[in-house]
Image (tube, rainbow, N blue to C red):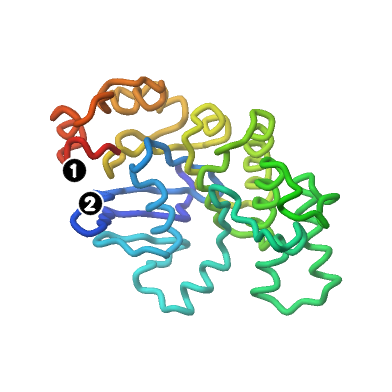
Amino acid sequence: MAAEALVELENVHFARGPRMVLAGIDMRVPQGAIVSLMGASGGGKTTLLNLMAGTLMPRSGRVRVAREDLRTLSFDGMYRLRRRMGMLFQHSALFTDSSVFENVAFPLRRHFRWGEDILRKLVLMKLEAVGLRGAAGLMPAELSGGMGRRVALARAMVMDPMLIFYDEPFTGLDPISVGIIATLIRRLNDALGATSIVVSHDVRETFSIADYGYILAGGRIIAEGTPEALQASDSDLARQFLGGQPDGPVPFHYPAHEDYATALGGSVVAGEGI
């Protein structure tokens, strides 16, 4: 983690009404790395992605991307910064009434006024990178789940972003497609010289490509480190999550016992889950 940080969070708090979602997050994402955000549902992972993308602002603390403090950016400044980001949504979020080609071309048409020849070359180049150049004329309804996710990946990186967010990229895919997507994330991150942040519940595939990871619970980071270090974590919560154990600090029975809230430093109400 010695490389210069592209994304930094310092003592970030975020709440929805009276409920504290994130309670003092410190995080550093080095340039060129693939960093994973893991933890049970409701732990604040997607909220963190939104804070890094500037679509949400923290109640307190600081979020910096490419040395820019997001809270101080103007509307135009935020817009320029987001042009350097890519996003792979959880369920691909393809435009169902547009072809594969037009889905990938959408960011380019939105931001640039290029001729059709240049645009076509760029789009087909990105589709070639994910193995789907021959599917350019298909509609989303004609794609398998794995193909749709690859199209979404081509769209996420069509503008050669410096930072790519992945929200559950493996959800709903068969084992072959999961392996393909994992391989593409690693390969394209390295080829573009990009930085990637991956939110996922898939421990095995995420650890196969991540350089560093954070595990969240109750709005706090309970463990961080390389995949090897996380596997050896002394946190009971981290071990329960990584091992998929049905009972432990996160209880099987509702409402949660008081030990769970205590383990999280009192940051959540017992029974709310993570």
Q: Residues within 10 Å of mark 2 (few under 14, many from 20)?
A: some
Q: Is residue 217 above or below residue 140?
A: above
Question: Tag 1: residue type?
Answer: Ser
| Position in image of residue 59 (x %, y %) | 25, 62
Q: Is residue 59 above or below residue 261?
A: below
Q: Of residues 266 and 101, which is closer to you in this image?
A: 101
| Position in image of residue 197 (x %, y %) | 50, 47
Q: Alpha-carbon distance for marks 1 and 2? A: 7 Å
Query: Which numbered disc covers residue 213?
Result: none
Q: Is residue 208 above or below residue 63?
A: above
Residue in the picture at 42% in, 64% down: 54
Q: Name the image quarter holding the C terminus.
A: top left
Q: Residues within 10 Å of mark 1 (few under 14, many from 20)?
A: some
Task: Report whether 2 appears left or right of 248.
Answer: right
Residue topped by disc 1: 267
Residue in the picture at 68% in, 47% down: 148
Q: Determine which quarter of the picture holds residue 160.
A: bottom right
| Position in image of residue 7 (x %, y %) | 44, 55
Residue in the picture at 57% in, 68% down: 83
Q: Name the image quarter holding the N terminus.
A: top left
Question: Tag 2: residue type?
Answer: Met
Residue in the picture at 26% in, 53% down: 11
Badge 1 vs badge 2, beta-carbon distance below 8 Å:
yes
First in residue order: circle 1 vs circle 2: 2
Task: Report whether 7 appears left or right of 71.
Answer: right
For mark 1, give the secondary structure: loop
Q: Is residue 57 above or below residue 196?
A: below
| Position in image of residue 46 (x %, y %) | 42, 50
Residue topped by disc 2: 20
Q: Of residues 152 and 80, which is closer to you in this image?
A: 152
